[in-house]
Image (cartoon, grey):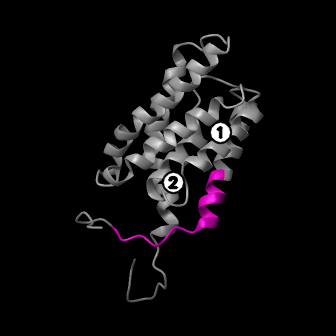
Amino acid sequence: MIMRPGQQLLLPANPVFIWFSLICALALNMLLNMGLFGRAAWVPDLLALSLVFWCVHQPLRIGVGTAFFFGLVMDVHQGALLGQHALSYTVMAFGAVAMHRRLLWFPVPAQSLQVLPLFVAAHLIGMVVRLLAGGSFPGWPYFLSPLFEAMLWPVVTVMLLAPQRRAPDPDDNRPI
């Protein structure tokens, strides 16, 4: 693949780190749902954010099947309609895998604008499924969550790519 000028060559992603980050995002989601905010509609879905990140950066390792599995886990945790999160995460992961080659050509702030429609679509699907099952409208703050997720995209990118930016065997003559 041809790289953009100034783009750093990354080490291969460690599969253990990928799965560790996804499990940590799942645990943070669970803590946010049980913690101070409860199930506030505006709280960003950190698991969805990390799933999209890994679907964009490692589409051969993390894809639609992984998103479906984590969606079922979130459904069971929240007591939601079984398949609600699974459907929205699966659609979101499919969109991320479909656009991953094009997305990586943009700088990180522009990437956050590119992934915003994925987050909006995932939240809309979850809301429509909830409404079809007889739930109530969560209110307009529900649509703040995709915006917060898009704003967190640069932070997540820096955090999750940090282990890949180090040199494989650093020494005194090579500063990177």
User: In this picture, which residue range is highlighted in magenta?
Assistant: 8-22
- The residue that label 2 is drawn on is 54
**Residue at the spot 64% in from the left edge and 23% down from the top edge:** 40
Name the mark on residue 71. 1
14 part of magenta stretch: yes
Residue 162 or residue 3, whichever sits in front: 3
Residue 135 or residue 148, whichever sits in front: 135
The kind of residue on which mark 1 rests is: Gly
For disc 2, the neighbor class at 10 Å (few under 14, some 14 to 19, many from 20) is many
| SS label for mark 1 | helix
Q: CA distance from mark 1 to mark 2?
A: 15 Å
The tag earlier along the polypeptide, 1 or 2, is 2
Give the left or right position of residue 50, taking residue 31 as reference. left
| Quadrant in which the N terminus appears | bottom left
Residue 21's image quarter?
Answer: bottom right
Q: Residue 13 placed where, x, y %?
A: 52, 67
Residue 101's image quarter?
Answer: bottom left
Q: Residue 123 placed where, x, y %?
A: 53, 27
